[in-house]
Image: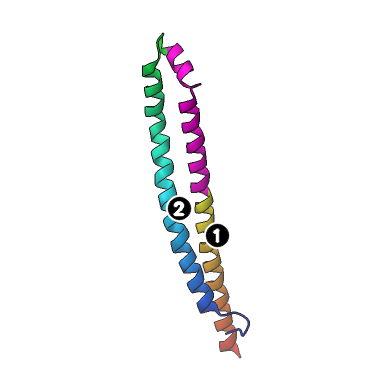
Amino acid sequence: MSDDIDFAARMRDACQAIEKTGKGYAEARAQSWHLQELRKVVLANEMRRLEGSMVERDMTARCTDAYKQHLEATSEAIHKELSLKAETEKWAAVFESLRSLSSLEKAKMQIL
């Protein structure tokens, strides 16, 4: 194998990074899903406190600080989820690249 690259060590590092970011991604995805589903509950709670027609209560509830804060938290959770997903996919691609390079190096050695 190439003297410049320790494929085994770099592949182990990539596997550890995949595991770490994968767990973070799973947790972030669960939090994101929970907040997205909870949006309906927050809106219903805000509407329940208000008076007027359903349309008026819905419009007013969507303008409350509690609802806006929930949307902001949901946005942040989705951003974290997608960032961790991208990082996990990056490390998977690094691993696959190293695996391919390692195979290429092994093939070169067999030719020599």
Q: Dot 1, how many residues are within 10 Å of its Cα: few (below 14), some (14-19), or many (20+)?
A: some
Q: In x, y percent, where is residue 50?
A: 40, 14
Q: Residue at 63% x, 82% y: name it.
A: 4
Say whether marks 2 and 1 touch (CB < 8 Å): no
Range covered by the magenta-colored residues: 55-82
Q: Residue at 41% x, 52% y: name it.
A: 26
User: Looking at numbered disc 2 in the image, what kind of residue is underneath it?
Assistant: Tyr
Q: Quadrant of the N terminus?
A: bottom right
In the image, residue 59 sits, relative to residue 85, either above or below, namely: above
Q: Residue at 49% x, 64% y: name it.
A: 17
Q: Dot 2, how many residues are within 10 Å of its Cα: few (below 14), some (14-19), or many (20+)?
A: many
Q: Quadrant of the C terminus?
A: bottom right
Which element is circle 2 on? helix
Which residue bears the numbered disc 2? Answer: 25
Q: Earlier in the sequence, mark 2 or mark 1?
A: 2
User: Looking at numbered disc 1 in the image, what kind of residue is underneath it?
Assistant: Lys
Predominant secondary structure, magenta span: helix
Q: Give residue 90's mark.
A: 1
